[in-house]
Amino acid sequence: MKPQSRLYAIADASFGDPVRLAQQLFDGGARLVQVRNKKAGARELLAQVDTILSFAPSDADVIVNDRVDVALTAGAAGVHLGQTDLPPQEARRVLGDLPIIGFSTHNLGQAVAADSLPVDYIAVGPIFPTSTKKNPDPVLGVERLAQICKAVRKPVVAIGGIQLESAEQVLKAGAASIAVISDILNSRDIAHRLKDWLTLLNTLHGV
């Protein structure tokens, strides 16, 4: 089942150069990294993804946010799609069977619908209040996350305002992986903060 990493790191351009951020995430031990640059055009994003792929560890998966065309051209591990992006069925047709496709959902209905789509994981959020989106969807909370995790078969990636201190309850709710942006990228030492996350997740291995 994909994604295999319990920590889903995101190199978000709103926190700086995504290439530099990705390097720091890899230095900290991340092996599943999404490149997110909402303001970049296809050419700029492709150049960034190409650069990141050039230094990514051989066992790392690099996911492109939104842009199926960039993911395909760059040869990235896959793409993450939102509700208003290219439909997952079309993305699967373009990318083929092997690349990872993730899909954002924001409520139980969307998550259940996504469970029958050709995607590898279902992102669910925001779990907690988040500042990384201008117009975030309503906060779900851990109880609704647990309800969704019980209702779907595919791996759930929890996202939105999750901090190190709340990771355990998110995993106990049934999430297979935790997507983290602010709690890592706002740190003065991104690689060190990411290592803190990996250490915690290793201690929670049985959760």
Image: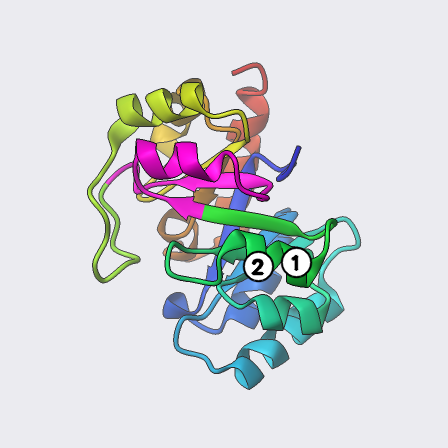
Q: Please, is residue 112 above or below residue 131 in the view?
A: above
Q: Identify the element where label 2 is drawn.
A: helix
Quarter holding the N terminus is top right
Q: Position of residue 34 (x, y in %)?
A: 54, 57
Q: Which residues are magenta?
A: 104-128
Residue pointed to by mark 1? 93
Give how far across and how far down residue 149 sits, in percent: 43, 24
- Secondary structure beneath dot 1 equals helix
Label 2: which residue?
90
Gap in angstroms between the C-alphas marked 2 and 1:
5 Å
Give the left or right position of residue 186, taking residue 190 as reference: left
Three-letter amino acid code of the residue under disc 1: Arg
Relative vertical location of residue 111 with respect to residue 44 in this rendering, above or below? above
Q: Nearer the viewer, residue 182 or 132?
A: 132
| Quadrant in the rendering for residue 166 | top left
Horizontal side, residue 25 vs residue 180: left or right: right
Check residue 114 for magenta coloring.
yes
Q: Find out whether the residues at labels 2 and 1 contact each other: C-beta distance under 8 Å.
A: yes
Asked whether residue 63 appears in the rendered view, the answer is no
User: Residue 95: x and y, percent?
Assistant: 68, 60
Residue 96 colored in magenta in the image: no
Mark 2 Cα-neighbour bin, 10 Å: few <14, some 14–19, many ≥20: few
99 or 64: nearer the viewer: 99
